[in-house]
Image (cartoon, grey):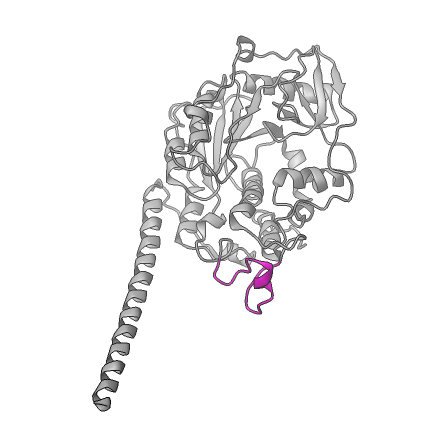
């Protein structure tokens, strides 16, 4: 009897092993099919007007990651001309380009697009929407814009574009200090011992890639010497914001020649302004900020300081290390009443889909008064200067989240994409 039981046991074990192998293969095939299907859905959402050639090998020579199919398609989309040119063929003299950078909060974006449609002067300028990777719902909202020239650009090296390799997460990345003790995981921890989170580092990568691309990479903007206004998907812009900004830009050289920028809102995001009959010069804020190519050149030269500072926040990096390296205070000029407000409850990587609670009842409760609908800055006003505002002190080393050498190098390589003579770090 023992002779016959042993073969039956082996047969059962072999059967279970084959079943396990089959289930594993089916799971792998399903995963591959799902990823492929997602890519095809994403690619089907693109415009198909690009007929030129594309060579990704030149970018790889700069040390940029090898591109996948979606990354290449995003790069090709970035070369398409603006839409609505037939309706708005001529841009106004001395127009100020508006750049709206977005992530994955469609509820916010719908509010901002509705607000921009009411912006006085929006039909005179070019709106550029910079996406952190690709999200179909965000893309469809922007494609519905009909009130001005609009150009979309997509960050082709966003961690969200790479599902299983850097800049996204890969299987051999270190995820904790325990992983770091293993010999085969990759990645450097930040100053607090934490390893990279692709969703977190994407914020700083997107901002820096966008800046380099808008100022130096796009046919529509690389010869633009005037100011460019930068807003985010959770910045509510009042109807008079564009006209107010035009006034500030025209006054800046006379009223505040040492000012680097013009802002629509106070540095303190909770402030609605002082209500004085005067202009304000203060630290440069991160809501509705604008500057020209001369200032961009100064910022671009500080790529090493920006890319190697251990803080995943682009704005804190600027305040703590880039601006102080200029050697003099970095002031911005603004009006005494805000023309932009930060709104919303959710962080940058929350609030996806219609079911989120990022906005109460789908509404933004920001009061817009009659004075916010017309220009309310006077050219005869004097300038009050905030000489000593609280900020990051010398020796501040950042909040971390940006310790991986691969992120440092990718960031720095973005500064070299369009300027071949830019030195190595």
186 up-or-down from 378: above or below: below
Q: Quadrant of residue 182?
A: bottom right
Instruction: Look at the image and tell me whether residue 175 can be seen.
Output: yes
Residue 15 x, y percent position in the rendering: 25, 75
Q: Is 48 contained in the magenta span?
A: no
Which quarter of the figure is the C terminus placed in? bottom right
Instruction: Look at the image and tell me whether residue 227 can be seen.
Output: no
By secondary structure, the bulk of the magenta-drawn segment is best described as: loop
Residue at the image point whose x is 69% and y is 39% from the top = 298
Q: Which residues are magenta?
A: 170-188
Specify the farthest residue to the front. Answer: 1
Which quarter of the figure is the N terminus placed in? bottom left
Residue 286 x, y percent position in the rendering: 62, 31
168 up-or-down from 93: above or below: below
What is the number of callouts on the image?
0
Residue at the image point whose x is 32% and y is 46% from the top = 41
Locate residue 114 relative to residue 11 in the image: left or right. right
Locate residue 91 relative to residue 83 in the image: left or right. right
- Nearest the viewer among 19 and 315 is 19
Residue 423 x, y percent position in the rendering: 67, 53
Residue 53 x, y percent position in the rendering: 40, 50
Locate residue 375 relative to residue 132 in the image: left or right. right
3 up-or-down from 293: above or below: below
Locate residue 284 relative to residue 31 in the image: left or right. right
394 up-or-down from 116: above or below: below
Q: Is 173 contained in the magenta span?
A: yes
- Nearest the viewer among 361 and 327 is 361
């Amino acid at each position: 009897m023992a002779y016959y039981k042993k073969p039956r046991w082996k047969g059962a074990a072999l059967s279970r092993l084959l079943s396990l192998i089959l289930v594993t293969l089916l799971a792998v095939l399903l995963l591959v099919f799902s990823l492929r299907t997602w890519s095809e859905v994403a690619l089907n959402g693109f415009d198909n007007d690009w007929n030129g050639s594309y060579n990704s090998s030149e970018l790889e020579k700069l040390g940029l990651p090898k591109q996948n199919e979606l990354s290449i398609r995003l790069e090709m989309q970035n070369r398409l001309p603006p839409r609505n040119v037939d309706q708005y063929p001529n841009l106004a003299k001395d127009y100020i380009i508006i750049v709206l950078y977005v992530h994955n909060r469609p509820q916010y974006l719908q509010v901002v697009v509705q607000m921009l449609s009411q912006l006085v002067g929006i039909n005179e300028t070019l709106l550029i929407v910079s996406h952190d990777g690709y999200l179909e719902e965000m893309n469809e909202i922007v494609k519905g814009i009909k009130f001005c020239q609009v150009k979309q650009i997509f960050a082709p090296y966003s961690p969200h574009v790479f599902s299983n390799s850097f800049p996204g997460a890969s299987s051999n990345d270190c995820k904790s200090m325990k992983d770091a003790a293993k010999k085969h995981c990759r990645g450097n921890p930040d100053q607090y011992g934490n390893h990279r989170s692709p969703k977190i580092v994407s914020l700083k990568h997107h901002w820096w890639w966008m800046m380099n691309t808008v100022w130096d990479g796009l046919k529509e903007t690389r010869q633009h010497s005037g100011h460019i206004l930068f807003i985010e998907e959770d910045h509510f812009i009042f109807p008079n914001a564009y006209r107010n900004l035009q006034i500030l830009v025209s006054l800046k050289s006379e009223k505040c020649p040492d000012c680097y920028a013009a802002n629509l809102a106070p540095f303190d995001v909770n402030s609605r302004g002082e209500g004085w009959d005067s202009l304000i010069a203060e630290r440069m804020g991160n809501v509705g900020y604008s500057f020209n190519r001369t200032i961009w050149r100064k910022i671009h030269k500080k790529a090493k300081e920006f890319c190697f500072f251990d803080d995943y926040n682009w704005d804190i990096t600027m305040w703590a290390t880039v601006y102080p390296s200029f050697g003099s205070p970095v002031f911005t000029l603004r009006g005494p009443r805000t023309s932009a407000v930060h709104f919303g409850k959710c962080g940058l990587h929350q609030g996806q889909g219609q079911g989120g609670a990022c906005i109460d009842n789908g509404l933004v409760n920001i009061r817009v008064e009659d004075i916010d609908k017309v220009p309310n800055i006077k050219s005869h006003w004097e300038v009050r200067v905030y000489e000593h505002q609280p900020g990051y002190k010398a020796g501040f080393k950042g909040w971390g989240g940006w310790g991986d050498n691969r992120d440092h190098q990718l960031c720095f390589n973005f500064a070299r994409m369009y300027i071949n003579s830019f030195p190595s770090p």
